[in-house]
Image: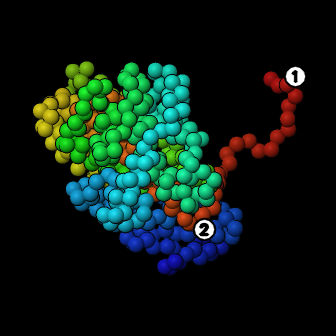
């Protein structure tokens, strides 16, 4: 507690303590508001509400700053890897060599799905969206306890469950891809690292040695790293909300996948590509589309633009845009959708509609173009986001579990319905 503010409500003065975070953000602790005044705060979509204290990720949306555990995202992007960053997010410090080896080994030991889980995959129709398969399978995997963790207290098994989730989200994603494309199962190889194994499990063919292209491995690892955490966004808040009821980490992560799926959140990467394809098919260079967005024709939005927190630039988007040019160059590919995306960005960044609303490209604007170049189908883009976000969800789950003051999350509401009235018999209703 670092100070107080005074709130005058119906002539009554209430002193409320303030809490200042390590980067100077101020939160007013309204813990006594309702008991002392009977009033609650009303903040739909939580734009002004801090739901927790957290030591994992810091964002300054005005300055375009994103830090994981105090490390700048741009530095991690150049110097770290997804798995090292996952460890950092979950355990708070960069791992030593031994810790990283142990963590990687735990991931390898937990990468295989229980063999019976293939029956669940078989039960999905071919048209099932990979995100619905992902959330169902993550949840289902909690029904297959490992002999190592069975019956042990949650705190003791956490490192195993964390490793299992991070490792198996990739196995589930690739298994659903292979099933949808009529490919035989492909199992992880112990000599490959996390991201190499993802590519191997996706694209290897029977009877052929799959050698992952190092440039593609690096680009994909970077995409996972850039998505690894993002403070109290919709899916992470969902994970924390579910965790607050002391549900297990699989149930909490599965709920996170569901929240991520929406086009205003992680589903935006698929929506961006659909939008770019539509513009391309119509022979538009983006101008007509942007006019429709500005005139709010059909409630269209420029997908991949805007963010609740970033009001200047999204540092992840800057890194991804550079990577996008690099990957396409290295693969000697050109993509008309990249040209359209660049044109849209150029127009929007100079257009009063977008400038006055502080709408800039977000992480999803260019990531889909890289994934398309790698050969990942569009309906799997949000799954890729979920693979990347898993360490962040796990870290936030751990923070809830470790917080001895944690209580079940239970917001209040302002009721706007009917006042008490009498029941009308069916025969008397008009
Ligand atoms: N295109 C056109 N107009 C927009 C856009 C957009 N992408 N985003 C916001 N606006 C307008 C909106 O219509 C509103 O205008 P007005 O004041 O005239 O009514 C104003 O900007 C404020 O919008 P809002 O919906 O109140 O803003 P928000 O903070 O609630 O929404 C957002 C944030 C990310 C959901 C929104 O910007 C959006 O829908 N963007 C497109 C979807 C997208 O790219 N989502 C991915 C976000 S980054 C990945 C992640 O972490 O989830």
Q: Residue at coordinates 28% horizontally, 50% vertically from top-left?
A: 316
Query: Which of the pair 73/300 is nearer the observer?
Result: 73
Q: Position of residue 24 (x, y in %)?
A: 39, 72
Residue nearest the viewer, comparing 392 with 197: 197
The vertical placement of 200 against 360, above or below, is above
Q: How many labels does the image show?
A: 2
Residue behind mark 2: 405
Q: In which quarter of the image is the C terminus?
A: top right
Mark found first going from the N terminus, 2 or 1: 2
The answer to whether residue 42 is above or below residue 20 is above
Instruction: Give the secondary structure at mark 1.
Output: helix
* Mark 1 C-beta closer than 8 Å to ligand 1: no
Q: In this view, does 98 lie to the left or right of 34?
A: left
Please give the residue where the numbered disc 1 appears in the rendered image: 427
The residue nearer to you, when weighing 155 against 207, is: 207
Which residue sits furthest bottom? 3
Q: x, y percentage for residue 405?
A: 60, 68
Which residue is rendered at x = 39% and y = 20% of the image?
182
């Amino acid at each position: 507690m670092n100070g107080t503010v005074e709130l005058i409500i119906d002539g009554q003065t209430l002193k409320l303590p303030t809490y200042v975070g390590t980067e100077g953000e101020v939160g007013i602790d309204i813990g006594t508001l309702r008991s002392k005044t009977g009033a609650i705060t009303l903040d739909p979509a939580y734009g002004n509400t801090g739901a927790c204290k957290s030591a994992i990720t810091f964002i300054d949306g005005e300055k375009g700053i994103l830090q994981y555990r105090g490390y700048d995202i741009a530095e991690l992007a150049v110097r770290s890897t997804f798995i090292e960053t996952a460890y950092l997010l979950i355990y708070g410090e960069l791992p030593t060599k031994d810790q990283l080896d142990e963590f990687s080994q735990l991931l390898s030991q937990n990468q295989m799905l229980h063999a019976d889980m293939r029956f669940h995959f078989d039960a999905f129709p071919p048209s099932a969206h990979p995100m619905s398969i992902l959330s169902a399978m993550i949840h289902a995997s909690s029904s297959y306890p490992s002999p190592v963790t069975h019956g042990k207290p949650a705190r003791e098994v956490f490192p195993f469950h964390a490793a299992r989730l991070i490792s198996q989200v990739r196995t589930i994603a690739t298994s659903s891809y292979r099933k949808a494309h009529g490919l035989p199962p492909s199992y992880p190889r112990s000599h490959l690292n996390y991201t190499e194994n993802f590519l191997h499990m996706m694209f290897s063919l029977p009877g052929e040695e799959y050698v992952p292209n190092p440039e593609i491995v690096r680009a994909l690892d970077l995409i996972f790293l850039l998505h690894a955490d993002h403070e109290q966004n919709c899916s992470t808040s969902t994970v924390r909300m579910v965790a607050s009821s002391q549900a297990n980490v699989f149930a909490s992560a599965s709920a996170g996948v569901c929240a991520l799926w929406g086009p205003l959140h992680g589903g935006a990467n698929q929506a961006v590509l659909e939008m770019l394809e539509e513009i391309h098919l119509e022979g538009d260079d983006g101008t007509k589309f942007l006019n429709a967005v500005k005139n709010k024709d059909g409630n269209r939005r420029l997908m991949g633009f805007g963010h609740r927190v970033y009001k200047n630039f999204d540092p992840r988007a800057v890194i991804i845009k550079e990577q996008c040019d690099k990957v396409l160059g290295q693969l000697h590919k050109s993509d008309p959708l990249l040209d359209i995306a660049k044109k849209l960005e150029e127009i929007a960044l100079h257009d009063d509609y977008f400038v006055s609303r502080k709408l800039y490209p977000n992480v999803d604007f260019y990531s889909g173009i890289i994934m398309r170049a790698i050969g990942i189908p569009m309906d799997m883009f949000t799954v890729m986001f979920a693979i990347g976000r898993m360490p962040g969800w796990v870290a936030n789950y751990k923070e809830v579990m470790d917080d001895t003051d944690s209580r079940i999350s239970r917001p209040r509401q302002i009721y706007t319905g009917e006042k008490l009235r009498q029941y009308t018999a069916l025969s008397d209703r008009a």
